[in-house]
Image (spheres, rainbow, N blue to C red):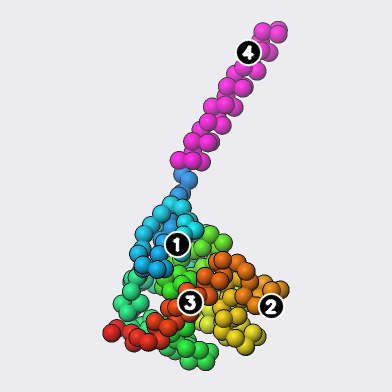
Amino acid sequence: MKSIVKKLLYLIFNFNFVVLGFFLFFLFSHAQAHIYRCENLETGEVFFSNQKLNASYCQLYIKEKPKNLNPKSLGAKFPYSDNYAKLPGEYENWFEKVAQDFSLDPALLKAIAKVESSFNPRAISPKGAMGIMQLMPQTARLVGVEDPYHPLENLKGGAKYLRMLIDEFRELTLALAAYNAGPEKVKLYRGIPPYPETQSYVKNVLYYYSIFKSKKPNN
């Protein structure tokens, strides 16, 4: 009797081990590696990596689409380009129109979109920020954005949120810091938070703002 029980336990143990092995194989064989698009802010060099490097500004470039993503809203494939001057006229017009609606400078919106997503409406950050202006889910709800992957809707939401922050803090650098780190952090530190990411973010946006402000599209 004892020998039969031992055999049964042996079979059960081996069966569970095999099942576990198949499960782990299935899990890891279907794991998806994230690909990051990185840009050296000093040289302008763009490269790709499977790691988010601290030395460069890196944006999650390839990730499995969220289940709630509505592909119909994306329309035609976005003609992605590293050069803002190659943005299609439709998108150029959107920046102009949205900026006018919220009393903002279109060059400022372009600078934020450049730093946030490099004009990629399908960008998803490791923290969950989405779209061309990288709206967090709670921010998207706050400004009434239903589809954060639609570039125009996302741009409107980002502009609306930026307008709210400028009106609240009355200073562009503080508004940009709040856009990146959150308004509560700016209030807590009574200025730009002492986070390297946020401090770098403000400098980078202002840098691209000066570039976009001094150059006209398609020149």
What type of secondary structure mainly makes up the magenta span? Answer: helix
Numbered range of the magenta stretch: 1-29
- Horizontal arrangement in the rendering, residue 31 relative to residue 80 (left or right): right
Q: Position of residue 51 (x, y in %)?
A: 46, 53
Say which label, 2 or 1, has the lower sequence index: 1
Indicate which disc residue 84 carries.
none
The residues tagged by marks 1 and 3 sit, at their Cα atoms, a distance apart of 15 Å
Residue in the picture at 35% in, 64% down: 45
Task: Please state which amino acid type lies under the numbered disc 4.
Answer: Lys
Image quadrant where one finds the C terminus: bottom left
- Horizontal arrangement in the rendering, residue 207 relative to residue 89 (left or right): right
Task: Please state which amino acid type lies under the numbered disc 2.
Answer: Arg
Vertical comparison of 134 with 34: above or below:
below
The residues tagged by marks 2 and 1 sit, at their Cα atoms, a distance apart of 28 Å
Q: Nearer the viewer, residue 180 or 140?
A: 180
Report which residue position mark 3 lands on.
Answer: 205
The residues tagged by marks 2 and 3 sit, at their Cα atoms, a distance apart of 20 Å
Indicate which disc residue 7 carries.
4
> Which secondary structure, mark 2?
loop
Q: Position of residue 197 (x, y in %)?
A: 55, 66
Report which residue position mark 2 lands on.
Answer: 190
Say which label, 2 or 3, has the lower sequence index: 2
